[in-house]
Image (cartoon, coloured by chain):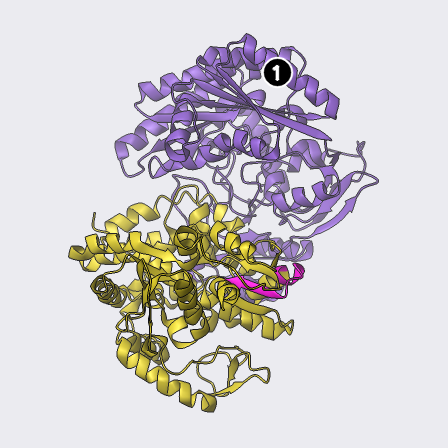
Chain colours: A yellow, B purple
């Protein structure tokens, strides 16, 4: 099978029986209540596109941009249509057209990871000119029109890339590589540090390959699959070099991409690497998955007196089928009072660059998420994806409720830290 | 194409945010959940928020002689929401408030765009019960449910939508706003326009408000599943349950093709050589439910059920129902197209109909899986096929015709709950007769002389398929 063959995608698209189940699950549709924007409408348009009865119109581009790629429709589709893949592939068709300059610049940097690391180190120093820190130190907001809503709370850049910080090796029995991903590499160093602390406490030898690049998710989701495939190739070869037993990730989207998308990207662009991609896929572990499998002996020594609830990241719950593991980890930690939130698996509204382009919509989705989180009475939201962390932090700042946001592994690190 | 001034006037009525005319939007509103009919683009999509706005749109349409096609969530399986003559698609989903739940009079007043499942949840939280539960419950609208007189799994004991509509607010084809029925169970004032509107498939009026009758929520319910090696034994069991004066809330049947498909896709431990599975749910007062369940089990045993599973906990209940829940999805994944029919026969003819469906599948070399509401005779043969193979599509059409003919021959009807729309229009005269169609045509012409509302649906003047 050649996955990039339009005929193959046509066969997938027409499986949509237009039953309408997606109308009951799509978070974007729940806000906008418009047939064109639900999966069924998008499938109608993509089917027409594949039959060359629909041109690459600005309206189609707008419709395709209104998808969080949260996979809720895909996992609920009775006919098994790979809706999220069809949407991101249809975006590919637009990628030949000029992207906005901001995205173009970012994507060209993402493809050159060492240059990106250097640029973001510099940007980390200069960010105070473009962004002002919030008085409480929890994030920052744009001072200038940057193509990002000026109300948007962003997490500050961390300066030097996480992977450039030395030493980054812990000694131990099994050997793993930590794949940081851009959000941890450039923003949430605390998450990366927590991963290494936990691995070290568990006697795992961990390395942080310096040459790792962006996993490719943001680029592929925006339609540039060729560049995403380049990154896949680079990362597959880099991770193979490090000769490890496993690859640990703490970003839901990176994990989902390394496990699933690399195989498909290679099948399309680098068929000779499909075997290696499959091999890698088997060795990738979300940190909570890795904990369950290899770190059960870890002593959780510190009490962490928090009232905590958990938010399922789309790419962890639906992308990797991981929902029990993080909850078990959280409940194991002494001192934690865990309260399950209603609709914990509902998308927080981030959707990568969706929340930058459609900020008002992302805010509405986030408002609903914040309400379910607040209703638990928890003081801390735990989640497994840095993108969700940033969007929920934005919600916390916007609503003024000041609920704390932590990654599952940060909680774990608090409990094992000596 | 609509004249610019028509679009302009629509914008004046509902605001520019609620009028769509981009080609992409028109394409998405050209279809519903029906397979096999070409999409014809409407000229505009409009989303009114009140009966007054609907009225103004219909007056405009009469002035300009433009068709108007009412649409809820667009989940029709008979092409009911397809704008086959173009014109304006009028979506009712902005009118989505539950206006009132009257616990003293056991009734609710709702707008047509309320999603059925949301209504169910709301009344059930108050200890009340609205039985009609079509398969599209989670996403279809109550307005759509009324317009096609939807049914569901509980038809045998609780009837269908028409048994729960006390009154309506309807915008008539000429734009007049009419209130039919009322808030009382008894009401014989004038013609029963409520009954005329229920099931009229959007051809006689646009429903803008519904008064529903409610029931108290049954105190208890129990589910069980029985597996049969022999289809006839399953059929006899259905007949015996009713003969013993037990009316289960649901009585569902799945045939061997369905069982094999579910097992292949969902792996829940169903025996793939079984010929039929019956799913039974009894509800009512605690004591009665236990007695009824015991009787049903005894009957299943008497007719040689190979295996009986009884749900004692909510988890077990979910397990018992998982086969049925997985059925449609499992079948849909076999090929690229699934056609769900809903010819309905008198309950006693269910075994004969199922046998006929098995033969029809063989004769036409097709996959036809039967699952459905055995208790009320409303079977859903699902034909699974490749839509890109013209020969197969031809055989599907032939088999469908044979199923209709047999259903009518057994004293049944073309459609139990999906409606006629465009899908079965060609066959209507088999059941209604020429004079029956003439009666419908005269009603339509009297109420809608300009043929504005959902034209080209339910019946047509030409005779259609020869009987």
Q: In x, y percent, where is residue B48? A: 61, 57
Query: Image point 56% across, 83% down: which residue?
Result: A134
Q: Residue furthest left?
A: A272
Q: Nearer the viewer, residue A418 or B126?
A: A418
Height in image: A410 above or below B97?
below
Q: Which quadrant of the structure image shows residue A198?
A: bottom left
Q: List x then y, in percent, for residue B434.
A: 52, 24
Residue annotated with mark 1: B296
Q: Residue furthest top?
A: B302
Vertical arrangement, residue B79 with respect to residue B341, above or below: below
> For residue A207: magenta?
no
Q: Which residue is rendered at x = 43% and y = 80% of the image?
A: A157
Q: Chain of mark 1?
A: B
Quarter of the image where one finds residue B107: top right
Relative to the observer, which residue lies in front, A217 or B238?
A217
Q: Residue furthest bottom?
A: A129
Q: Which residues make up the magenta segment?
A: A372-383
Q: Nearer the viewer, residue B113 or B155?
A: B155
Please provide percent x and percent y for residue B417. 55, 31
Give the SS element for disc 1: helix
Q: Is residue B85 visible?
A: yes
Tell me residue B76's x, y (percent): 51, 40
A15 on left or right of B74: left
């Amino acid at each position: 099978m050649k996955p990039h063959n339009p005929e193959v995608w046509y066969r997938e698209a027409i499986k949509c029986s237009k039953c309408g189940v997606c109308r009951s699950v799509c978070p974007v549709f729940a806000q906008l209540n418009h047939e064109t924007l639900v999966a069924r409408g998008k499938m109608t348009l993509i089917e027409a596109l594949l039959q060359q009865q629909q041109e690459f119109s600005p309206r189609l581009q707008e419709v395709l941009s209104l998808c969080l790629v949260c996979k809720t429709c895909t996992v609920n589709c009775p006919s098994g249509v790979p809706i999220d893949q069809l949407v991101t592939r249809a975006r590919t068709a637009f990628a030949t057209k000029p992207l906005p300059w901001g995205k173009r610049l970012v994507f060209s940097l993402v493809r050159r990871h060492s240059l990106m690391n250097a640029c973001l180190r510099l940007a980390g120093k200069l960010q105070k000119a473009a962004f002002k820190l919030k008085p409480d130190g929890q994030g920052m907001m744009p001072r200038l029109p940057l193509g990002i809503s000026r109300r948007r709370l962003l997490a500050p850049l961390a300066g030097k890339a996480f992977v450039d910080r030395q030493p980054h090796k812990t000694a131990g029995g099994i050997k793993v590589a930590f794949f940081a991903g851009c959000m941890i590499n450039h923003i949430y160093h605390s998450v990366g540090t927590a991963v290494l602390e936990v691995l070290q406490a568990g006697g795992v030898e961990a390395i942080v390959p310096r040459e790792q690049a962006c996993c490719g998710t943001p680029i592929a989701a925006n339609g540039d699959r060729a560049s995403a495939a380049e990154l896949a190739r680079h990362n597959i070869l880099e991770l193979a070099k490090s000769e490890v037993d496993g690859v640990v990730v703490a970003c839901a989207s990176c994990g989902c991409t390394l496990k699933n998308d690399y195989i498909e990207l290679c099948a399309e662009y680098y068929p000779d690497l499909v075997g290696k991609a499959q091999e890698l896929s088997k060795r990738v572990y979300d940190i909570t998955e890795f904990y369950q499998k290899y770190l059960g002996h870890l002593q959780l020594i510190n009490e962490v007196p928090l009232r905590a609830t958990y938010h399922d990241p789309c790419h962890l719950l639906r992308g990797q089928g991981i929902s029990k593991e993080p909850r078990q980890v959280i409940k194991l930690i002494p001192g934690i009072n865990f309260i399950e939130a209603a609709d914990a698996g509902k998308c927080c509204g981030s959707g990568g660059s969706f929340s930058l382009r459609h900020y008002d919509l992302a805010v509405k989705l986030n408002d609903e998420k914040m309400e379910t989180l607040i209703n638990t009475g928890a003081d801390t939201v735990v989640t497994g994806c840095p993108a969700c962390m940033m969007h929920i932090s934005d919600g916390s700042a916007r609503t003024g409720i000041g609920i704390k946001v932590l990654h599952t592994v940060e909680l774990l690190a608090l409990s094992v830290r000596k | 194409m609509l004249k610019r001034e028509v679009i302009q006037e629509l914008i004046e009525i509902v605001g520019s945010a609620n009028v769509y005319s981009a080609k992409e939007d028109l394409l998405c509103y050209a279809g519903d959940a029906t397979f096999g009919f070409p999409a014809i683009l409407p000229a505009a999509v409009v989303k009114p928020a009140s009966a007054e706005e609907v009225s103004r749109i219909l007056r405009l349409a009469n002035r300009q002689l433009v068709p108007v096609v009412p649409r809820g969530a667009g989940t029709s399986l008979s092409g009911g929401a397809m704008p086959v003559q173009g014109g304006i698609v009028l979506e009712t989903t902005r009118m989505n408030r539950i206006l009132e739940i009257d616990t003293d009079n056991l009734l609710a007043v709702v707008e047509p765009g309320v999603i059925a499942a949301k209504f169910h949840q709301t009344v059930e939280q108050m200890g009340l019960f609205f039985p009609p539960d079509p398969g599209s419950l989670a996403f279809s609208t109550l307005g759509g449910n009324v317009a096609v007189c939807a049914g569901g799994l509980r038809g045998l004991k609780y009837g269908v939508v028409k048994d729960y509509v006390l009154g309506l607010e309807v915008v008539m084809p000429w734009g007049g706003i009419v209130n039919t029925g009322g808030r009382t169970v008894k009401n014989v004032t004038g013609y029963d326009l409520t009954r005329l509107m229920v099931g009229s498939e959007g051809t006689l009026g646009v429903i803008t408000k519904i008064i529903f009758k409610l029931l108290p929520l049954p105190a208890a319910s129990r589910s069980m599943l029985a597996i049969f090696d022999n289809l006839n034994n399953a059929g006899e069991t259905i007949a015996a349950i009713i003969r013993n004066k037990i009316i289960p809330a649901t009585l569902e049947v799945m045939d061997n093709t369905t069982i094999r498909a579910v097992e292949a896709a969902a792996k829940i431990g169903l025996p793939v050589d079984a010929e039929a599975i019956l799913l039974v749910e009894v509800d009512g007062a605690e004591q009665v439910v236990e007695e009824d369940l015991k009787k049903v089990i005894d009957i299943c045993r008497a007719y040689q059920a190979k295996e009986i599973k009884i749900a004692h906990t909510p988890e077990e209940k979910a397990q018992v129902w998982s086969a049925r829940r997985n059925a449609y999805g499992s079948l849909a994944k076999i090929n690229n197209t699934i056609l769900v029919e809903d010819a309905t026969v008198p309950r006693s003819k269910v075994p004969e109909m199922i046998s006929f469906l098995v033969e029809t599948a063989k004769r036409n070399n097709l996959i036809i899986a039967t699952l459905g509401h055995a208790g009320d005779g409303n079977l859903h043969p699902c034909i699974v096929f490749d839509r890109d193979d013209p020969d197969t599509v031809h055989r599907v059409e032939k088999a469908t015709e044979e199923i209709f003919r047999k259903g009518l021959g057994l004293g049944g009807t073309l459609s139990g709950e999906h409606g006629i729309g465009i899908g079965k229009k060609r066959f209507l005269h088999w059941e209604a007769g020429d004079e029956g169609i003439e009666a419908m045509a005269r009603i339509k012409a009297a109420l809608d002389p300009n043929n504005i509302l959902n034209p080209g649906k339910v019946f047509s003047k030409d005779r259609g398929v020869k009987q």
